[in-house]
Image: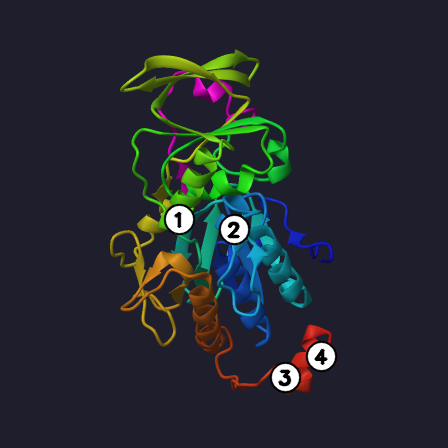
Amino acid sequence: MSAPAPITKAPAGESHSTDVVIIGAGPAGLFSVFELGLLDVKAHLIDILDRPGGQCAELYPEKPIYDIPGLPIVTGEELVDRLLQQIAPFGATFHLSQMAEALEKLPNGRWKVTTDAGTVVEAAVIVVAAGGGSFVPKKPPIPGIEEYEGKSVFYAVRKMEAFRDKNVVIVGGGDSALDWVLNLQPLAKKLTLVHHRDGFRAAQHSVNQMRELVAAGKMEFHIASVSALHGANGQLSSLTLNGKEKGDYDIPCEMMLPFFGLTMKLGPIADWGINLHENLVPVDTEKFESSTGGIFAIGDINTYPGKLKLILSGFHEAALMAQAAFRIARPGEKLRFQYTTSSSSLQKKLGVS
């Protein structure tokens, strides 16, 4: 695969004017740039992360995804890279490492978004594509864990190679824990799974594969909890486990991955006056517009009858949202629906004619 397409990052604290502000630069937000771009609608994206990609980039950059149409297998990072290449012709502007903090309706009918870094963007349309909001990992209640975070304790796998030939301990019993057990076991010098009970909230086939590896002596499974960390200067050397049968005992550990789930925080969006239902934005299924005119919600942040939280659903929602956003951003202009396969003007925009 070719190198990721370059993106335009705007310095913090500046003022801008555009057609659409997209809050969230995950797959749904990125594909929105494409659908809007086909209609000559310009977009700025605001994201709290330091790079585009949302949860794909933050939580599973190297984890395989199998349900993207036309791509039988693609990692989160590869999907983001492909989306960035696809939207490159449209020159979107990114405001990264910033939270959309305040939203104001202006007298002229446009919106003003202000970030926590002092950036101001005015636009005719707001698209909330913030996934479940800002997500933070649930941390295990282990004294002194902060000293090791980012050095030998990690809440996500950025690069699998970092775990090659290491003594790795994974803590948890959900899909993330079991998925990374299976992905990292071939790389690690030694891999140990620790869970407080002999039952899991993960796909049964993953649990079966893990048990087969244990039976074959290729990894260890301990029914216990982690009660203490041992090491120096942020580097782990061992963990103290507490089990019902064995009490307290130590096991060696160079790198620990606790997967206790995520805490979703909607953040300032909850204070914007948009009608919410259980921290999600109810939308119609014609335009994916919220109860507030000119504010749309796509991806995991929205809710409607029959909603499926899938990336491909976000792509579909982005396409219909773009049609409605055009009518707001370009009042008086006629919307011409065209196919990229047959429209020479669209192909020219994409640089393929």
Q: Callout 2: 10 Å neighbours few (<14), some, many (20+)?
A: many
Q: Which residue is mark 2?
A: 56
Examine the rendered structure and indicate whether residue 107 appears above or below residue 140.
Answer: below
Tell me which label, 2 or 1, sits earlier in the chain.
2
Of 171 and 122, nearer the camera is 171
Of 148 and 195, nearer the camera is 195
Tags 3 and 2 in contact by the CB under 8 Å rule?
A: no
Q: Which residue is mark 3?
A: 341
Give the amino acid at mark 1: Gly
Q: Disc 3 on helix, strand or loop?
A: loop
Q: Looking at the image, which residue sits at the far front?
A: 216
Give the amino acid at mark 2: Cys
In the image, residue 45 lies at what x, y percent?
A: 54, 56
Of 309 and 331, nearer the camera is 309
Q: Which residue is mark 4?
A: 348
Question: Rounded to the nearest whole Å, what is the CA distance between mark 4 and mark 2?
Answer: 30 Å
Q: Disc 1 on helix, strand or loop?
A: loop
Q: Disc 2 on helix, strand or loop?
A: helix
Q: Quadrant of the C terminus?
A: bottom right
Q: Callout 1: 10 Å neighbours few (<14), some, many (20+)?
A: many
Question: Which region of the structure is painted magenta?
Answer: 134-153
Tell me which label, 1 or 3, sits earlier in the chain.
1
Asked if residue 212 shows in the view, the reply is yes
In the image, residue 245 lies at what x, y percent?
A: 28, 18
Tags 1 and 4 in contact by the CB under 8 Å rule?
A: no
Give the amino acid at mark 3: Thr
Tell me which label, 1 or 4, sits earlier in the chain.
1
Examine the rendered structure and indicate whether residue 66 appears above or below residue 97.
Answer: below
Q: Which residue is mark 1?
A: 133
